[in-house]
Image (cartoon, rainbow, N blue to C red):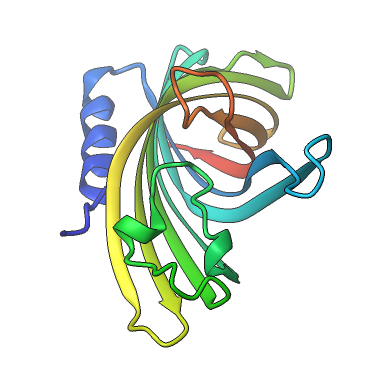
Amino acid sequence: MKSTCFLPWFLGAVAFLSASSAQARVQLSPYVSIRSTSSIKPQTTDKSKETATSKQRQEAGLRGAISFWRLFSLQASVGQSKLTTTSKVQDAKDEYGEIDFAEDMSVSGDNPDNDLKVTETQRNARLSLAIDPGFWIFILRAKAGVTATQRIIDTEETGKEPVNKIFGPTYKPHAGAGLGLRFSPKFYVMAEYNTFHYAFPKIEPFEREVAMSFAIDF
């Protein structure tokens, strides 16, 4: 399966929006974020107790935005993250519930105690509509949109050939809020808290993200 490239789509969206309104301002915003998913399941020995597990991944990327009337903005971003985990074959489970390792990645259950190394690269493209009201040097942000995710999975199991497969892209809604500090008319920094609803239309479970970015207006 060929890899999907999000960069031409991202640049095309920014160019189209830039030409659509003479009052618009273009912003470029590199960002880094920490995203986490959590799962809770009963213990096998004591069903009255639960075990909580969490996975974190760091993502970096570039966001472009067209701002209208200093209040609304349409944002498009591309980013990539990579996460490597090692476990026993019997414990292999996709945190999003989308991949069956035995069927999709040819992981054998014949030797459940074999070591299994899973490396996942995620490519994410997002389109968001944001409201950015400013108060003196502070900026508030509320946004919602859609995230397209492509997952590249590499598995290495003891005694077997490595397997590489590409899944997606899938499309899921996201929402978020942020607080920014403006240092000049054309430069500000922003901290954001975002949620990605990968089990949509169910609200839970969801993925959380804390992101830091700085923006330059043109």
Quadrant of the rendered image containing residue 74: top left
- Picture coordinates of residue 154, whole percent (x, y): 39, 69
Q: How many marks?
A: 0
127 and 37: which is toward the camera: 37
Residue 184 in sight from this viewpoint? no
- Picture coordinates of residue 190, whole percent (x, y): 65, 36
Q: Residue furthest left?
A: 2
Please give the name of the residue rendered at 58% of the width and 75% of the height, measured from the top-left corner: 113
Quadrant of the rendered image containing residue 40: top right
171 and 13: which is toward the camera: 171
Please give the name of the residue rendered at 58% of the width and 29% of the height, measured from the top-left corner: 205
Residue 199 in sight from this viewpoint? yes
Q: Residue furthest bottom?
A: 159
> In the shown orientation, is residue 28 left or right of residue 163?
right
Please give the name of the residue rendered at 54% of the width and 53% of the height, measured from the top-left corner: 59
49 and 121: which is toward the camera: 49
> In the shown orientation, is residue 42 left or right of residue 164?
right
- Picture coordinates of residue 188, whole percent (x, y): 63, 36
Name the quadrant of the C terminus. Answer: top left
40 and 27: which is toward the camera: 40
Please give the name of the residue rendered at 55% of the width and 40% of the height, measured from the top-left corner: 215
> In the shown orientation, is residue 41 left or right of residue 83?
right
- Picture coordinates of residue 8, whole percent (x, y): 21, 47
Name the quadrant of the N terminus. Answer: bottom left
Q: Is residue 206 above or below residue 82?
A: above
